[in-house]
Image (cartoon, coloured by chain):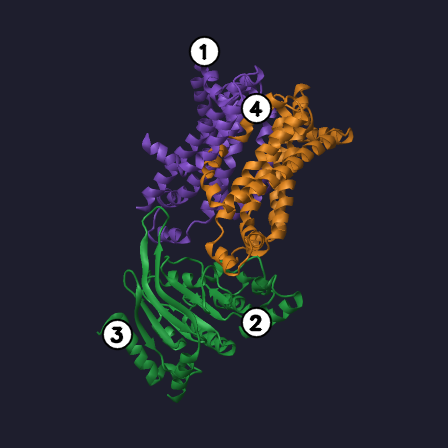
Chain colours: A green, B purple, C orange
Amino acid sequence: MQRGLQQRARLVDMQASYECTNLRAEVGSRRGARRVVLDDVSFTVGKCEFVSIMGRSGVGKTTLLRILAGLQEPSPDSSVSFGGKQVAGPPDGVSLVFQDYTNSLLPWRTVARNVALPLEGQLSKQERETRIAETLEMVGLGDRANDRPFELSGGMQQRVQLARALASRPAAFLMDEPFGALDALTKSDLEDQLLDIVAATEMTVVFVTHDIDEALYLSDRVLVLDGTPARIEAEIVVDCPRPRAQLRTRESVEFLSARHELHEVIFGTR
Amino acid sequence: MRRLVERVRLGSLPGLLLLFLVLVGWELVGSADSPFYPAPSSWWPALVERGQSAAIVPALVDTLRTFGLGLTVATITGVALGLAVGASRVVGRATAPTFEFARALPPAAIVPVATLLLGFDETMKVVVVALAAVWPILLNTSSGVRELNPLLRDTARSLRLSKTRTLFSVLLPSVTPSVILGIRVATPVALVITLLVEYLTAVNGIGALVGDAQRTFQPARVFALIVIAGALSLAVNALVRSAEERVIRRRRR
Amino acid sequence: MGRDEGLNRSGFADALGLSVLVTLAGAWELMVRSKIAEVQFLPAPSEIAAAAQSAVFDGQLIGRTLHTVGVTLLGWSVASLVGLGLGLLLGLSPIAYRYSMTSFEVTRAIPPITLAPAALLIFGFSLKMELVLVTFGGIWPVLVNTMGGVQKVAPELRDVGTMLGLSPRAMVQKIVFPAALPSVMVGLRLALSLCLVLAIVAEIVGNPAGLGNGLISARQSLQPALMFTYVITAGLLGVVLNAALGAVAKGLMPGDRARRDSSW
């Protein structure tokens, strides 16, 4: 409990990483019907915070993430900033991890060369080699550097994507349901691996998921996106101490009460 | 008629802008009398002038007839051989080198040989077309047989169906989609080879007309006939594709 | 017997296939020699072999083959470069794609062979005519397949490039082109087969050189065995060229990316 409060105090001091004010976003073709997907979305993500964004399918979580990533533009009145600067195009120091790892890894490059992609043109060959080796060690794929993606299992491929996102040592990770396509066992392995990485690198993470338990297990805060158009309907604080453990944390009082709260918000009291 | 136009499925209309611009540019730059690049506006008149238009419809009929006959022969032969090749691994491997060898011979090179051996008649044309078009049908039929769902065989046996019933009610219907695919792939081949044979041998058909216009130095007519050949090709392919879809749709239900 | 074990022992299967081929050739020889079924002008395999041998020795076969191969490869190379360049440009620009794709689909329906008469009219009986026909015909498959391949690049891959802040040139070089490579290779292989056929057609009707012309002159002098020789050589040429390009494709795209034989 003590540790939780200390953590909260630390967060309040930190300058916000991401800051969204009155975010409004539309989707649709230029000439066709345009639909307002997000409206009046406002939240902040503090430095080194792990925030999950939850919501039902199609509510707009991916749109929100893409806006944070700079891949999509919000409506003119919105304000989205990262590290104090308005987001216009992919911001420096932000990496995006996709759910569909098969289509986002380059199948014609080896694992090591995939991880090298963000570093080409930034680091010297020597520095690149070192960085790649380090990063692959962090995700536990040090011995698969020369294999091709199709030779690896789903979980390993996702780890390669993680490594690629990590290679540039970003300040923030944006993750779009990264473990959604994996089986339960691999999922828990990767969840823990992610927490280790985040703890070691002190990154900020915005994590999109529709898995309640995963959101609670990983995050400091869970934001619930709901409505048409969608807005932040609720915010659940997860007071569990870190480091977290699959069994201990999920059985703890703090976890269960946060889970109860989140459940009520999403499904109503039943 | 509208359904046919939809079926031709030319994609979106804006995509024709490039073609439109090229034709307009050609029109502006060329002239009707240019010996090499007559302007597009002169193509249609060249078709119908001096009573030469009378030859076109019969030529179309000739081309379609040769195409149809050739494709039919190719289908019958291709399915028969394909069934045999697909049914038995041994037969498949034994005949593979022979078929690969025959398949590699370019139809264009076969035409002069065919005219020597068979003369300048419809039979020769049909033989050459069939020779070229049989391969997609054969290959697709045999792979259709080989990829037959083993469960179907077991089902037929557990229902104690006779051999003939098994063949006609179970096996042949399940091979049909592959056969249709083979026919669809073979169709453009058959049409192109028909035109080629007609051009090289000047017996009859659109291909012969083009050769004729070329030898009498009528470039506008040549281009007009090329357009007709292209339109014919689009129409035939669209028809076969829609026939294929109708067969597939009936099975889905 | 295990699913593939017995019959797929490579040696046995190939030997069986070859012996079938040889048996058929033997039957053919017998049929002609014994005059069971008389087909005028049909040569026996032994006659074909003899004709081939003399054609090699008097330099005809090799000279003509070299001509045809040379024209095919030259035209194909130029066509590939043009088709690749245009295909990339058109595929990368959504505007260009939208206003031109249907045009290409429509003109693609025109069988390149029907362009031979036009080429003949414009360029006469010359090497130029053959080269123009081969090159022009070869551009379309490369262009259309390159364009399609570029368009089909998975949006996630493009997003990855955008997220990494890749310059347009790096984007094409590192992501778009490698991703489109399988389609590009299909286009290149189709173009190669087409170029060979167009070369032969051009030689039959227009340019007095090469294998096509060899066919015609053998026909005019009523030498069917020599004709068969040229036909078989043309076939072998096609197989060799296709196999060579296939090997290159496999080298460029190891593992699961190499496409299977695409001649269908």
At a point 46% along the width and 73% down the height, the residue shown is A204
- Nearer the observer, A113 or A150: A113
Residue type beneath disc 1: Gly
Residue type beneath disc 2: Thr
Position in image of residue B168 (x %, y %): 37, 42
Instruction: Identify residue for label 4.
Output: C118
Instruction: Identify residue for label 1.
Output: B51
The answer to whether marks 1 and 4 sit on the same chain is: no
Dot 3 crowding, Cα within 10 Å, few <14, some 14–19, many 20+? few
| Element marked by disc 4 | helix
Please say if the residues under marks 3 and 4 sit with CB atoms less than 8 Å apart: no
Instruction: Identify residue for label 3.
Output: A264
| Element marked by disc 3 | helix
Residue type beneath disc 4: Ala
- Give the CA separation, mark 2 to mark 3: 40 Å
Dot 2 crowding, Cα within 10 Å, few <14, some 14–19, many 20+? many
| Element marked by disc 1 | helix
Q: Residue furthest right?
A: C57
- Give the CA separation, mark 2 to mark 4: 62 Å
Instruction: Identify residue for label 2.
Output: A135
Q: Residue furthest top?
A: B50
Q: Name the image quarter holding residue C88.
A: top right
- Nearer the observer, B60 or C109: C109
Q: Name the image quarter holding residue C36.
A: top right
The subunit letter for the residue under badge 4 reads: C
Position in image of residue B74 (x %, y %): 48, 32
